[in-house]
Amino acid sequence: MVTVRDAETVAPERRLRLAQERIAELEALQRRNRRVSGVLTRLATLADHSPSAIVEFDGSVTYLNNAAREKFPALAVMGLNHPLLAGLDVIVDDMRRVGLMIKTREVSLGENIFRQKIVLEQDSPQVSIYSDDITEDMVLQNALKKASEETELLAAENALLAEIGRIISSSLDISDVYEGFAQQVRQLIPFDRIAISLVDMESFTFNNQYVFGVPAEGREEGTVVTLSGTMILEAVEANEAMILQGDVEELSKEFPKMVRSGLKSVLLAPIVFKNEILGVFHMRSLQENAYNSHHLDLATKVAAQIAPAIANSQLYAQHTESEAEAKRLALQNAAIAEIGRIITGSLDIEEVYAGFAEQTRRLIGFDRIVISLLSRNSDDFTNAYVIGVPVSNRGQGDLIGLKGTFTDEVVRQQRAILFLPESLNETRTMFPGLLPQYHSGLRSFISVPLVYKDATIGVLHFTSAKPNAYSEYEVAIADLIAAQIAGAIENSHLHAETLEADRALQRQTQELARSNAELEQFAYVASHDLQEPLRVIAGYVNLLEERYADKLDQDARDFIGFATDAAHRMRALINALLQYSRVGTHGNPFELMDCNRALSEALADLEVSISESDAEITTDQLPEIVGDQIQITHVFENLISNAIKFKKDDSQPRIHVSCDRSQDCWQISVSDNGTGIRPRYQERIFGMFKRAHKRSKYPGTGIGLALCLKIIERHGGRIWVDSEVDRGSTFHFTIPAIKETTNDTRR
């Protein structure tokens, strides 16, 4: 660059050439600045629109971005005394002492938790703090932890149930094992007294076969008591587990033969085998309101474990005359106990099926065994487990239509069926669904329903190639086995659902963490790394305009004006894009809101435009909905602003807002008498940056209707337009109506 040293000694031609060179240099600088000024001006707005709350201070607060001002309105006044910045002076001093430039911490404000990144400027007193609300992230993490704990609890409870099953089935004399049984139950359900009462409906009495814990006069072990006026009768008649607790005096009035002994809470579960109530398993506590629905479910499971053992002990008592029978029953009970241990030893049912079949063969001979599980909400079933003689279209994993099958017959009758056909014709006549099995050489059939909590979930099938291989004795054993396996199958389903929920929660947590990390990095780059070069270049552009405006020709000044206008348009586009991108992630939670209020706020924001255009705006009464009031206000503001903008040159804008109820949603319409929209543009205008008119005539970003579309879709509705050129437009959008509820006073 040439510097003019002495203007008096330089010839006029020389001075002219030097001036022209200087102008050329300035124009070149202007062109370079123009190329980058638009981009840098755009970047200057990113910090203000970052989702992170950004605060800068150098002894006092010097800068707050939009997020910080919205989330912490008192911060600008309180400064370093604000709870968000508590202790920062000590942390910053420690960071400077050890040479640490970045540090993170967590701060709690009310119910919200914020993760902060503290950034020091190199050789500068300025400190930047980036704060992100991680409350939702922490909630998800806690939910994942709770789900894992519930899975562990389910496994522990299942192990205890397995041990209970082993204990109560380890001897044919059930009184020998009750003590160990009580200690295992106590780990599942708290009690101060536990009892097993067997009922005799013929004599209308019950007998406390087993009692442990707080003594109660007249209810000792072995005591026979009439059922009338007792809680035992209540449980028998209801045929379902129940909790009786609360006001002891009121309970005493309802159950006059209630024995208190200081016991204030009662949990009862019927002991049911083959649809016959054998008795009631009940626990009592000295604590008030000691039991809940989870205890109720556990008591139901324990009662289901007890039932086969009690039934087997009664069967044993009926056959004590024969030593051989006693030995056989002992082996049978041991096998049933082992089956119970195997099928409850794992939450993964596939791991235990093989061992189950091996133990079952010791009780019932078979050439084929199948566990068929009914599909939920459909008319078919799946053979979940199959071993033995193959049958066409009846293999493991096959999905089979229920209608017309032997499985269908068992489910319909809800009882075990023994079928010993003498011929193919008898099979075809009685149970045609068994023809595939008969053609495979099978001749004896036992099928038993798998019932859990009074619901049939599947069928257990035993088949043999020998004619007349089974009797009612094997049917009774099959019933015992089915009662054992039904609960394990249901637990395995619950376990599988819990695992899938855990995996989904983990994926959601990981995705949220990744998204938060990306937003944090974006905020750091946009509001920190790019701030300084942006200020420098913007400053030089301003200096160029201020210092050399009188040395530039009109074209150069026009160029600067064009660059400034372009920067303003770019800023508007960035703001619109940020607003569009945050509709779904930064919107307010839905709540009950009044559309009339949202419209009023929109009209207040447009007051200047309405006045300047002399627009006439009328409205119907609008409904209450569940939604985001700020976003619905923005929809009204966009639609009414467009109606004013696209008015006909020779007419006053007339705008009407109406609504109509259509089935389960409200349809709100904004009508105008403007220029209208050609049919080919009526869908296009809802796209990003899509316009129906030239920007030179109608300024704007071209993103307003796209933003409206995204907001309405977030609310579960849709938006569209009806329009004719020169006759005006009507924009319609729908919002789900609030569901009406009624109070059901029936009991």
Image (tube, helix red, strand yellow):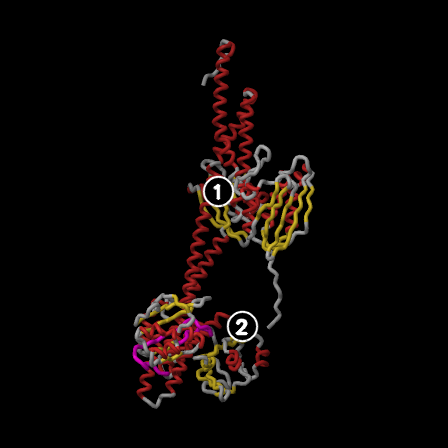
Q: Is residue 455 magenta?
A: yes
User: Circle 2 — which element?
Assistant: loop
| Left or right: 133 as drawn, with respect to 732 | left
Residue bearing the label numbered 1: 523
Of callouts 2 and 1, the N-terminal one: 2
Label for residue 117? Answer: none
Q: Position of residue 293 (x, y in %)?
A: 50, 70
Q: Nearer the viewer, residue 125 or 452?
A: 452
Q: Nearer the viewer, residue 730 or 317?
A: 730
Q: Quadrant of residue 327?
A: bottom left
Residue segment shown in magenta = 448-472
Q: Nearer the viewer, residue 356 or 510?
A: 356
Residue bearing the label numbered 2: 289
Marks 2, 1: nearer the viewer? 1
Viewport quadrant of the N terminus: top left
Specify the amino acid type for callout 1: Ala
Structural crowding at the residue carrying mark 2, measured as other residues with C-alpha within 10 Å and reported as few (<14), some (14–19) or many (≥20): some
Q: Nearer the viewer, residue 111 or 701?
A: 701
Q: Quadrant of residue 637?
A: top right
Q: Is residue 351 above or below residue 625?
A: below
Q: Image point 38% across, 73% down: which residue?
A: 162
